[in-house]
Image (tube, rainbow, N blue to C red):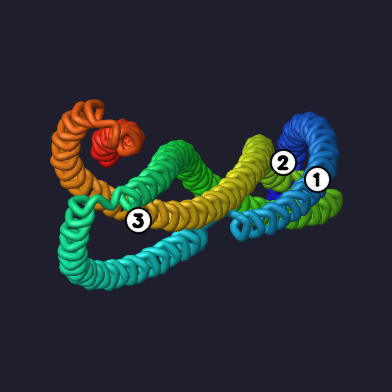
């Protein structure tokens, strides 16, 4: 355009100089010709220069256009990749959201299933109540039994005082009866003395027939007393044997009861040790539950943190998508502008083409910057993918840890159920053993009380028999003493009588000697001999009777002692 302006200026100069001189016309034409040639040469050079510039610009334009098409293809490929990656990310996010929802549901279920401190306190209270109720019932039963035994003891004390009062009353009655018997015996003794005097009078009177009858009656009474004494000795031996057997039975029952009591005490000690082991096991399970609860809390915190990171990453992905859409819209707008500029380049001249090429270069630089920005976003997307993969790994580890936590919770539930089952078994076993020991104790107590009652009854009977036998022995001893005194008195009387008889015998012998000399007394002498032999026989029997009474009086005190 600068050449066209100079040519018009020169042409105007030529028109202006047309009114000059003719001489100057030819010179002007020559100068004009030379100037035109110069101008043409300049224009040709300028045109060649413009042509070469145009060719270079065209080649640059073609190169840039190819590069632009390549960038467009790369952009389309990147857009397709980004769309595919976005779809994958959306699918992955949908899957992760579903997994997160499942995990939240499972975590809620686990939160419901995991033993909280409140539930643990409730379980402890329930177990304590279950353990305290039978113990309280057992304690109440023991209190009732103690009260029952206390009432029985009070009753026995009352019975003892009543029996003691009865015993004192009976003792008083017995003393009164003894006094009465002493009075009666003193009266009997007075009667015996009277009879003695009568007997002495009869002996002095020579009534030997009644004396022999009385001696025979005394011998019969002696035999009866001897038989009665033998029966009493046999009864006393039997009573002693029964007393020894009852004492041995009581000792055996006492040993059996002591052995059973020791066995029940050992069983109670074993049950207490089992109870302590179960309590230790329960404490260990509670500690494991607390540790699992703490692990569960830590894992839930990690899971919430991962959820927050996933949410932030989702927001970043959305922001990147929005920015990518904006940049894509800008690129499309720039592409439309480039196309419009290309159309303008085809219509405009070389200078406008140069300016447009500069603008295109600027826009290409801008596009390269945008491509760099896209590359950076691509790197960010790869970084996000990597971070997403790490989050997936964390989610998988969390799921694994959740599975492990579920397994540990299941194991803890199984161990808790097993411990509860063992606790129930031990509780039932302790209750069964307590019932069995209580039943055995009641049975043994009832048997012991029955045996004690029977033994007491038997002992009372034996004591009564013994007292009766003792009384009989005392009566027999008193009677024997009376008989001994009587026999001693009778023996003394009989000795006196014997002396009298001996004196009479001497007198009779003297009379017999006199009678031998006098035949009138022969018959009287024969009668006196018969009477003498009879008296000697009676004297011998009386001596034997005295010796038997003496032996009997010696054996009776020994049997009493």
- Most foreground residue, 336 or 281: 281
Residue 94 lies, with reference to residue 160, above or below; the image says: above
Kindly report which numbered mark, 3 or 2, lies closer to the viewer in this rendering. 3
Q: Earlier in the sequence, mark 3 or mark 2?
A: 2
Residue 521 picture location, percent across and down: 28, 36
Q: Quadrant of the C terminus?
A: top left
Circle 3 is placed at which residue position?
468
Residue drawn at the location 81% of the way across and 31% of the way down? 63
Mark 3–mark 1 distance (CA, rounded to whole Å): 119 Å
Element on which disc 3 rests? helix
377 or 561, nearer to the observer: 561
Q: Position of residue 292 (x, y in %)?
A: 53, 44
Residue 112, above or below 39:
below
Instruction: Tell me which numbered mark, 2 or 1, is placed earlier along the sequence.
Output: 2
What is the crowding at mark 3: few (fewer than 14 residues within 10 Å), some, or many (at least 20)?
few
Q: Residue at x 41, y 43 (%)?
A: 223
Quarter of the image where one finds residue 191: bottom left
Q: Position of residue 164 (x, y in %)?
A: 24, 67
Category of crowding for the residue at label 1, using alpha-carbon neighbours closer than 10 angstroms: few (below 14), some (14–19), many (at least 20): few
Q: Which mark is residue 88?
A: 1
Tell whether label 2 touches label 3 (CB within 8 Å).
no
Query: Secondary structure beneath disc 1?
Result: helix
Q: Element at badge 2?
A: helix
The residue to which callout 2 is attached is 28
Q: Mark 2 and mark 1: span between their CA atoms?
A: 83 Å
Q: Answer left or right for 102 relative to 213.
A: right
Which of pointers 3 and 1 lies earlier in the amino acid sequence? 1
Do the CB atoms of the residues marked 2 and 1 lie less than 8 Å apart? no
């Amino acid at each position: 355009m600068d050449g066209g302006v100079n040519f018009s200026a020169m042409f105007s100069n030529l028109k202006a100089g047309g009114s000059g001189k003719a001489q100057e016309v030819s010179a002007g034409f020559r100068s004009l010709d030379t100037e035109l040639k110069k101008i043409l040469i300049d224009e040709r050079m300028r045109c060649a220069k413009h042509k070469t510039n145009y060719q270079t610009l065209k080649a640059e334009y073609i190169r840039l256009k190819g590069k632009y098409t390549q960038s467009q293809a790369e952009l389309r490929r990147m857009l397709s990749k980004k769309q595919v990656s976005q779809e994958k990310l959306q699918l992955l996010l949908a899957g992760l959201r579903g997994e997160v929802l499942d995990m939240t549901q499972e975590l809620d279920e686990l939160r419901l299933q995991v033993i909280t401190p409140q539930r643990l306190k409730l379980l402890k209270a329930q177990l304590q109540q279950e353990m305290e109720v039978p113990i309280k019932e057992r304690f109440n039963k023991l209190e009732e039994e103690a009260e029952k035994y206390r009432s029985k003891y009070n009753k026995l004390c009352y019975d003892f005082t009543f029996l003691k009062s009865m015993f004192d009353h009976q003792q008083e009655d017995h003393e009164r009866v003894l006094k009465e018997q002493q009075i009666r015996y003193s009266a009997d003794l007075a009667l015996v003395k009277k009879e003695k005097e009568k007997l002495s009078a009869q002996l002095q009177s020579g009534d030997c027939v009644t004396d022999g009858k009385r001696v025979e009656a005394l011998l019969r009474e002696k035999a009866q007393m001897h038989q009665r004494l033998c029966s009493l000795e046999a009864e006393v031996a039997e009573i002693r044997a029964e007393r020894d057997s009852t004492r041995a039975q009581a000792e055996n029952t006492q040993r059996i009861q002591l052995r059973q009591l020791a066995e029940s005490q050992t069983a109670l000690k074993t049950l207490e040790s089992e109870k302590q082991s179960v309590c230790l096991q329960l404490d260990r399970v509670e500690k494991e539950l607390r540790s699992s609860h703490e692990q569960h809390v830590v894992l839930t915190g990690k899971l919430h943190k991962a959820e927050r990171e996933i949410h932030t990453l989702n927001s970043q992905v959305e922001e990147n998508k929005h920015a990518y859409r904006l940049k894509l819209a800008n690129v499309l707008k720039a592409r439309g502008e480039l196309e419009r500029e290309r159309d303008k380049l085809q219509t405009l001249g070389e200078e406008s083409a140069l300016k447009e090429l500069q603008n295109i270069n600027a826009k290409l630089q801008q596009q390269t910057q945008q491509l760099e920005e896209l590359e950076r976003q691509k790197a960010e997307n790869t970084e996000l993918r990597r971070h997403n993969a790490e989050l997936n790994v964390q989610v998988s580890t969390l799921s694994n840890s959740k599975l492990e936590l579920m397994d540990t919770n299941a194991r803890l539930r199984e161990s808790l159920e097993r411990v509860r089952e063992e606790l129930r078994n031990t509780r039932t076993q302790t209750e069964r053993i307590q019932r069995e020991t209580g039943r055995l104790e009641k049975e043994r107590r009832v048997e012991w009380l029955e045996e004690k009652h029977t033994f007491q009854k038997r002992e009372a009977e034996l004591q009564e028999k013994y007292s009766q036998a003792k009384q009989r022995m005392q009566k027999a001893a008193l009677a024997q003493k009376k008989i001994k005194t009587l026999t001693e008195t009778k023996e003394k009387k009989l000795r006196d009588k014997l002396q009298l008889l001996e004196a009479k015998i001497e007198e009779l012998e003297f009379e017999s000697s006199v009678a031998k000399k006098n035949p009138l007394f022969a018959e009287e002498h024969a009668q006196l001999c018969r009477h003498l032999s009879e008296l000697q026989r009676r004297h011998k029997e009386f001596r034997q009777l005295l010796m038997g009474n003496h032996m009997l009086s010696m054996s009776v005190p020994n049997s009493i002692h």
